[in-house]
Image (cartoon, coloured by chain):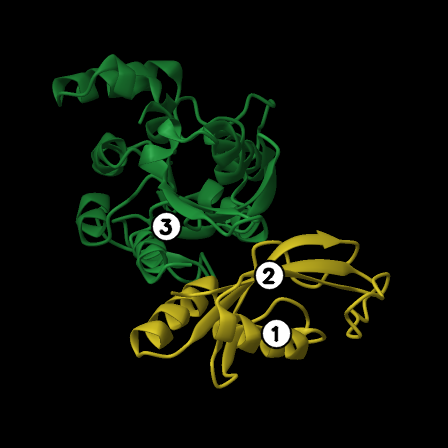
Chain colours: A green, B yellow
Amino acid sequence: MRLELLKSLNEERAARRAAVLVTDLADGAQRLVKAAELGADPLAEELDAALRMGKSRGAEAGGKSYFLTVQAPPVRIVCIGAVHISQALAPMAKLAGFDMTIIDPRTAFATPERFPGVKVIADWPDAVLSAAPLDRYTAVCLFTHDPKIDDAGLIPALKAECFYIGALGSRKTHQQRVARMHAAGFTDGDMARIHAPIGLDIGSVSPAEIAVAVLGEIIMALRKKPLRAEKAA
Amino acid sequence: MLASDDDILLQAQQWRQAGKGVAIATVIDTWGSAPRPTGSHLVIDAEGNFLGSVSGGCVEGAVVSEAAEVIADGKARTLEFGVADETAWRVGLSCGGRIKVYVERVD
């Protein structure tokens, strides 16, 4: 591998950007395909599939054997609202291999006692997320029912092109949310990226059941379809 | 502590930038109960220092010595290890799995 290629690979990783190193196993020829340039590559479909699964693997094309070294940033879940659903979601997310952060400015909710072993930040989402920005490989869940708090997480999530945004609340609540976001300058296309009501429609009743529906929906968004912005690129 | 992929590839870059001969070994295929998944890396410098793993420790020695050759001649090669494979490699995987490892030099 050329040192320049290795440097680029490490740079992409440090910046939490996805990339695939393609190696021709017969002659050792290599290229680094960044996620944003993936569509133009001759192996685009193979690369896209490997990237979505987040797993390195071999590929055969045109009589040649390739190895695809996949570098996908670890996926994070950020929950706005230190509520019951977050309490149930936290251990499930951990089991499924996701890092989770909970943000809620209401100090009575955002306590370490309610969330043992979970990163809980008792501050406003916009303040937290300007210090530690969201990115495409982050799922954002809005759980507070309070527009002041939820919107402070929603706006950065829309701007960061998070692969998943879900919002708790009735359809009527969501209509009001859409109206507020339109007023803030977001488009219908942006609004279509919000999963509302949040979670797969499995008839969940309890907070834990809703957490299952949310985690399922996050996994579906991650694995079943290409990450939106990358596909468009 | 198990080194993460970040540390491993960054170490390879740093060794090379410090002027050392460096090889990267990557697990490119596995069969059966292989201990490390496809895509795992082991990086080796010309003195035999290494970071990362391609197995549970059973074939690292053989990969490290082969890496010395790769660093010397610059030719990438694919190595195969496993109990079922008795051709060139005397080192086996105790778990009964088989792995294929691609070893290349950093130029």
Which residue of the protein is positioned furthest toward the bottom in this rendering? Answer: B47
Question: What is the chain letter for disc 3?
Answer: A
Q: Which residue is mark 2?
A: B77
Disc 3 residue type (three-letter): Ile
The residues tagged by marks 2 and 3 sit, at their Cα atoms, a distance apart of 47 Å
The residues tagged by marks 1 and 3 sit, at their Cα atoms, a distance apart of 48 Å
Q: Which residue is mark 3?
A: A102
**Do pointers 1 and 3 mark residues of a single chain?**
no
The image quarter containing residue A200 is: top right
Q: At 32% across and 35% down in the image, what residue appears?
A: A36
The residues tagged by marks 1 and 2 sit, at their Cα atoms, a distance apart of 9 Å
Left or right: residue A32 compared with residue A208: left
Q: Which residue is mark 1?
A: B66
Disc 1 residue type (three-letter): Glu
Question: What is the chain letter for disc 1?
Answer: B
**Do pointers 1 and 2 mark residues of a single chain?**
yes
The numbered mark, 1 or 2, whose residue comes first in the sequence reads 1
Residue A19 x/y as whole percent: 39, 45
Q: At 83% across and 62% down in the image, what residue appears?
A: B85
Front residue of this view, candidates A18 and A210: A18
Secondary element type, mark 2: strand
Front residue of this view, candidates A1 and B74: B74
Residue A162 seen from this side:
no
Front residue of this view, candidates A76 and A73: A73
